[in-house]
Structures are given as structure tokens and as C-alpha cells.
Image: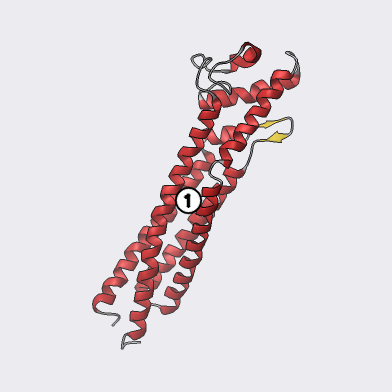
Amino acid sequence: MGVEGCTKCIKYMLFFFNFIFWLAGCVILGVSLWLRHDNKTSSLLELTYEGTEAPTTFYISIYILIAVGAVMMFVGFLGCYGAIQESQCLLGTFFACLVILFACEVAAGIWGFMHKDKISKELITFYDSVYDRGNLLTTDSEQRQAATAVLKVFHETLNCCGKGSIISGATMWFSDTCPQDKKTSDNCHAKIKELFSEKIYLIGIAALVVAIIMIFEMIFSMVLCCGIRNSPVY
């Protein structure tokens, strides 16, 4: 015989929320892997030009998300098992893991908010450096051809062309790398910002949902743990 009454209801609610938490971990892991292997981001962030690589800040964030998703799956399973078994030890461990995860998520959220524009700015700086250096090189040089190849990936991936709204005659050297309908509009700065803003927005929504679930789980786990301790059976 285990807990009864309201505490028993809390037990099954905790199991339900933990199952949702485990599913959320699966979703975060899946989304993180998708973001890591997304054709648009991968094709841009794996570019190199004269030994200079595209910024890796975005990938670092993705690797952290992959780790968080895996830990969430483990913690969710631990919570489900602890709730069903009515184990104070497992529930206490589960609560401690939740507190650590919640603190890490808050810290990551603050860091992300403070650096939300850093990723796009770094990639824009990389694009501009290739654009400007290629514009100064001679027509038949290998460096010019390398710059053209890098810019072509940017232009085809983002469906954009150049740094400004109009391509001047001085920069027409790479116009053949642009989509045919984009030679006079849609600058790449705006497209780069748009690309990463969409992905950061998606990550933010997922983090908010997980944080709300974690708060409920911490409350339910403590209530259930207290109920088990006060149960006459234990």
C-alpha cells in the first residue's frame, strides 16, 4: 500500500509531467541535431577562406542543447521511475537534478539574451572580409576564385546578393555568383540576420516551455516526497 488521497493524485501528475519532460528532452535533442545538420547553416558555417573559418559560436550553442536534451531524457526517466516506485531517494535525486538544470537554463538564457546578435554579426563580418578582400584582388588570381566560391555559397544558400541594396560597378566582379533575380536587391546582411533570428526564436520558445514544466515538476516532487515521508506505511 502506498500514498493515498491527494498525494496519490500528485504522484500520477508528477509521472505525467515527467513523461512530458522526457518527451521534451527527445524533441530538444531532435531539434538540436536538425539545427546542427541543417543545410543552410551547415553550408555557411563550414566555409573557409585563406585559413579563416566561419565563426563556430552557433555550433557551440547547438552542442550545449544536444547535451541538455540527453540529460533531460535521463532526468525525465529518473522522475517517472521515482514517482512510480515512491522512492524518496530517487525523488530527492530527481529534484536536485532539476534544480541544477533549471539554474543552467536560466544562466544560458541570460547569456543568450546578452549575445543574441553575436552569431549573425560574426558571420556578417566573415562575409564582409571575403567580399572586400576579393574585390581588391586581380581577376585571374586564385584568391579571387576562392573568394568567389565562398560568396557563391552565401548567395545561393540565402538567395541574396552583396552587402547593400544595389550592386555598384566596382563590385560587379562577383555578380555571376548571385541568383539571377537578386542582382539588385536583398542584401546578405539582412538575410543572415533573418536566418539566425528564426532559429534563436525557436530555441527560446522551447526553453520557455521546458522551464515551465520544470517548475511544476519541482513542486510536485517535493509534495510527493513529503507525502511519502508522512505516510504511515513508511
Q: Which of the two residues, 88 or 203, is positioned nearer the viewer here?
A: 203
The residue lying at 64 percent from left, 28 percent from top is 128
The residue lying at 55 percent from left, 26 percent from top is 188
Q: Is residue 222 left or right of residue 181?
A: left
Instruction: Tell me the quarter of the picture where residue 119 sits.
Output: top right
The residue lying at 75 percent from left, 15 percent from top is 138
The residue where tag 1 is placed is 29
Query: Does the image show residue 66?
Result: no
> How many labels were placed on the picture?
1
Classify mark 1: residues with Cα within 10 Å, few (<14), some (14-19) or many (20+): many
Instruction: Tell me the quarter of the picture where residue 209 sits.
Output: bottom left
Q: Is residue 62 above or below residue 220?
A: above
> Quick one: which residue is furthest to the bottom in this view?
232
Horizontal and vertical percent position of residue 144:
71, 19
Q: Is residue 126 left or right of residue 70?
A: right
Q: Is residue 108 above or below residue 127?
A: below
Horizontal and vertical percent position of residue 201:
44, 43
